[in-house]
Amino acid sequence: MIMSQRRVDLPAIAGGDPVRSDFLSFSQPKLSEQEITAVVETLRSGWLTTAGRAREFEDSFSRHANTRYAVALNSCTAGLFLSLKALNIEPGDEVITTPLTFPASVNVIEHCGATPVFADVEPVTGNVDPNRVAEKVTGKTRVILPVHLYGRPCDMGALRTIADSRHLQIVQDCAHAIESEWKDRKLATYGDFACYSFYATKNVTTGEGGMVLTDNEAWADHIRILALHGLDKSAYDRYSEGGRVSYDLKEPGYKFNMPDTAAALGIEGMKLLNQRFERRVEIWNRYKSGLAGLPGLQLPAESPPGTIHARHLFVCRLDPDKAGIDRDTMIESLAKENIGSGIHFTPVHTFTYYREKYGISDDDLPVASEMGRRVFSLPLTPYLTDDDVEDVIRAVRRIILHFGSN
């Protein structure tokens, strides 16, 4: 049967017909009517920037994450940066993080003038390896910045132990991990700061947006001030009924606040979080079943008991020697089938800026470097139909079975 498929089901890149006539985007957001209505109502309210809806979203998300304080911002990147600023990270300090992430996780360290120190990743999960983190701690280390890759939580027990024993802080990049838990606890309860993303493709979206969570009131107050120019009162506090127009500048700050129009999306998105998560789990399981056993294709590992994987990205790894095809050719082949895909991620140390500034080679971070050459991501949004999912499975199978037979 398999031999017949190899001969007959020719991939489009080899001259066959594409599995789809229309292009399936890798990640195209769709909004419910209740989300759209919430934004329209906010537009008609007469107050568009940061006000009551942003505060409501903060309260909703802090309850979800089981933390005391939340500050809504215009991006997760802003949350990471302001967390480091609240900790007074400065030139001469070191922050240990992973190379296998989006550049924003590392750029914020550079923006503070501190030095990013890369620890290699675990070969199964792609998350930063606590053993490698422990090896990188020096007298200059101030912060560990783990990234919960693809929605699978890092080993926060091990990282928390390292941080506590060395008197370090933890700033978590939870951009992929809104639903994630480690050992039956919300991720935000393990770190000094936890930063979340509500970018257009995230599991809850505000179009652009982020949130920083902490249990430390002083840190939360500091971040709220830094996020709005350094002023001690927002426009809402100054100009709404009963507000005081006068204000003070505590320190030069930034413009990172979340407007109410964005927060309105987030409030409604939180109400749909479980429903959309359940659909992603269904798609995940279909992929795992439909793609099992293909030569050279490594599927995502399951999480250990007591943890929740947010299922934000379905990332496969390709062994070109066994599959007969390399990762870049796989992505090109999927595009010919009218299937979008992604790369998550090109390791940060391989980009020109970081490679030239720090002189890090692939041999210094062998696991992350090898993964960066092999990973590719399949569409995983709750808006995929069952037919869409079957198209993706058929495309991947026909490509690998064709190239693997040559």
Image (cartoon, helix red, strand yellow):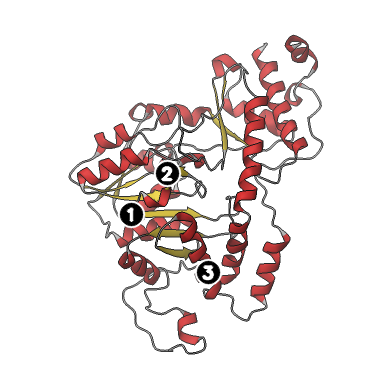
Relative image position of residue 2 (x, y in whole percent) = 73, 12
Question: Where does label 3 land, which residue?
Answer: 56
Amino acid carrying label 2: it is Val
Q: In this view, does 290 lie above or below 260?
A: above
Marks 2/1: CA–CA distance: 14 Å
Left or right: 362 in relation to 48: left
Q: Do the residues labelled 2 and 1 touch (CB within 8 Å)?
A: no
Mark 2 element type: loop
Q: Name the residue under label 1.
A: 192
In the picture, residue 394 is in which quadrant?
top right
Name which residue lies at 58% across and 27% down.
327
* Amino acid type assigned to the residue bearing label 3 in the image: Glu
- What amino acid does circle 1 point to? Asp
Q: What element carries label 1?
A: loop
**Residue of label 2:** 147
26 on left or right of 237: right
